[in-house]
Image (cartoon, rainbow, N blue to C red):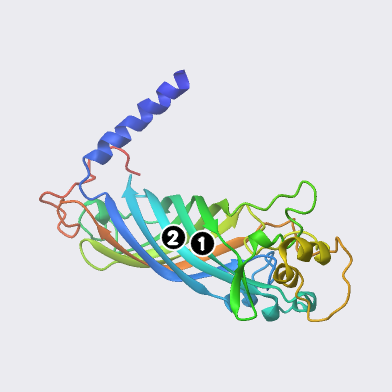
Amino acid sequence: MRNKFLIWFLFVPVLLSAQRRQDRFELVFMGGAATYAGDLGGDQTKFSSDHLQKLGPALGLGVRMHVTNFLALRGNFNYGMVSGADSLANDPGRKLRNLSFRSPIYEGSLLFELSLFNWRHLIGEKVNATRGGKTNLYLFGGMSFFKFKPEAYYEGRWYELQPFGTEGQGIKPNTPHYQLTSSALVYGAGFRFLLGGRVSMGFELGVRQTNTDYLDDVSKEHWDNGQIEATYGQVAAALADRRVEDGPRPEGSKRGNSGVKDYFSFGQFTLAFKLGKGGGSQGGGGKGFRTRNRCFQF
């Protein structure tokens, strides 16, 4: 109880201070590209140009709240499309396996941002050499929750893979179908520069270290294709094993690497608009909120 009271005691002044800030909120628009690292294509344990051959769109919308000149909180909603293909890999074994996929991603995230330079002009201070410049670098991290749906292209159409049990899900004992929602650890960096008193533009790269190994529908071992076909049909069996060479595959042979979870990343340009009715940050006076003689400065 004492610890909870102490947390409240420290946190309430921050909230009260934040309520007095007219310019602490920004609306952030994001757009760029999404990429994936997992069991298909390049090796997810190392950076590889294989992954950059399958870029998809990434769009987002966020709200940023500046708590101090160096610390901000941001809530985001992102949409992205990721994909991968063994045909683009440098590894001969992956080329022989010949699997491919795409998946839309719908993500909500809560992030902390740490500015490496003073960024006072976003909360009403005059921009000059002593009060913060027009450019800024920042680091960010947090958690996200997302929904995905891996699909594969076969004979002229896209098929959703999760219901097909391509690794024996729903057939093999104690192996249910995997969930299509997961969480991720988010971390990255970005830069931004001021275009005007209330508008800034920049670019950021954020990596998602997920808690699922099924973003690409590939994780563990092959299952008997005859049983997959008998349970889910011919298309399911064809998508479970798409090797470029024919021949029987022993049940239980390796299909993916379950020891490493999947990753995806968003590289996005950002355009942020300061909200509120306070004075412009270029003015340094008037109605704008001033951080001098206030608490929570560094």
| Residue that appears at 42% across and 28% down | 7
- Determine which of the numbered discs, if any, sits on residue 185 in the image: none
Among the 4 quarters of the image, the one containing residue 216: bottom right
Between residue 193 and residue 242, name the one nearer to us: 242
Q: Is residue 7 left or right of residue 132?
A: right
- Label 1 residue SS: strand
Q: Earlier in the sequence, mark 1 or mark 2?
A: 2
Tell me where residue 28 appears, x and y as whole percent: 33, 60
Q: Inspect this view and state whether residue 277 appears.
A: yes
Q: Is residue 115 visible?
A: no
Residue at the farthest top position: 1
| Residue 256 at x, y percent in the picture | 75, 63
Image quadrant where one finds the C terminus: top left
Label 2 sits on residue: 78
Q: Amino acid at mark 1?
A: Ile
Mark 2 and mark 1 in contact (Cβ < 8 Å)? yes
- Checking the image for residue 105, the label placed there is 1
Label 1 packing within 10 angstroms: few (<14), some (14-19), many (20+):
many
x and y percent of residue 52 in the render?
Answer: 58, 76
Specify whether 47 is left or right of 173.
left
Q: Residue at x 88, y 77 (%)?
A: 247
